[in-house]
Amino acid sequence: MNDNNTITARLRRLIAVSIVVSGGALMAVIFTAIAPVLSSIGLHFGGGAGGDFIAQLVMTVPAVGIIVGAPAVGFAIEKFGARRIFFTALIVFGCAGSAGLVTEQAWALLTSRFILGVAGAGVSTSTTALIGEWFEGSARSRMLGYWSSLGAVGGVTAVLLSGAIGESGGWQAPFAIHLIAFVALAFALYSIRPGSPATISTPETMNAVTGNGSILSLWPIYALMIPLYVGVFMTGVQLSFLIAANGINSPAEQSWIISMASVGSAIGAFFFGWIISWLGRRRTFILFVSMMGIANIFMGTVDDPLLVAIGAAFNGMGGGISNPFFASLILERAPIEIRGRALGFMYTVWFGGEFINPLIVTPLRMISSLHGAFVIIGSVLLLIAIIFALRRKTMVS
């Protein structure tokens, strides 16, 4: 009987860790499940600059939900616990994410996407908080890396599925991918029980930073994240339109190119724990920012599909490293009593860069073309990397 109980407990522990680490995959679904059909969505809403802008809003409005919802979610986690918030977020995620299956009106679609973003804030913040509770040190770095890596794998899967489904079922069909949240909910309800963090790993609370910390003390980190995440999301928000400008309009053809960003992200995130142990925090930062800068410049100067895919992979790899990099930095710097709010605000700033991406790129596109916008964004990222390379003491040291 004891052996059976031990096996059951270990199974639940394995499932619990797997579901929490898979939170990144659900987040990726928000922004990749409809990426190959963005140009088709633009055509549905009239085509041209106006239709394309609505399509970009469909992609980016969830970021508004994350930006608005993440601080409140962080506070709720501190009050009610990450476990309850995770369950609630999964339910809302599945309902709001699949709403695009039944609505064709812009206002209804944008509203459901906003609610999906709030739910995504709940998923991302609660799962990151659970990792922070359950793990410490190098184990935490690895789990955060796996969180982002699985997010990239989920992104690849969602992009490829979306391309195939969108090709045969139209632009609405890929919204069904969001229903995967209900599968995750079933496993979460089974495995994540009250008090389960104590059974998983050495609690971080034993060595946590404590004290009267303030979110304001972390503002330099948050400010740095904004321009970097404008670059990270160039592949998610703008790449479909860049590919279309190069003469490729088929969702199926676009999907394999866009998916290379997720492949690169999976690789970068998976090896994050090893990279930061080898290079240290400052050199890791310079590495991934340089990669994104070079990749964006490269994508803006070539039109061959294979070369664009290579650039997307390198930009994705840099983004894959950046995600666990900032999550681990916030978990380390934020006192435990404000950790929920610190993580919530991290996701607010994180996706703030994604939301303002079209607001920055659209005028750049009007001035210098979309290809030129990629080159400009990449040049800014390279400049940031050079500045941090020249300074020995930085906020990420």
Image (cartoon, helix red, strand yellow):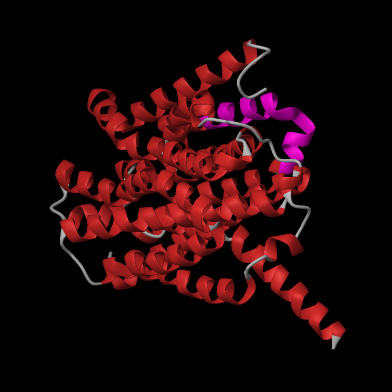
Say if 45 sits above or below 316 in the image: below
Q: Is residue 170 left or right of residue 174?
A: left
Say if 364 sits above or below 173 in the image: above
| Residue shown at the point (28%, 68%) measured from the top left | 99
Say if 250 sits above or below 132 in the image: below
Residue 154 shows in the view: yes
Query: Residue 199's quadrant in the figure?
Result: bottom right
Q: Main secondary structure of the magenta part?
A: helix
| Residue shown at the point (68%, 12%) measured from the top left | 392
Comparing 85 with 105, the one in front is: 85
Q: Tell me where the magenta segment starts and ends, as one range.
A: 273-293
Location of residue 322 in the rendering, given as x and y in whole percent from the top left corner:
58, 37
Location of residue 80 in the rendering, given as x and y in whole percent from the top left corner:
50, 58
Location of residue 268 in the rendering, given as x and y in whole percent from the top left corner:
64, 43
Residue projecting furthest to the bottom: 1
Location of residue 393 in the rendering, given as x and y in whole percent from the top left corner:
66, 14
Residue projecting furthest to the front: 212
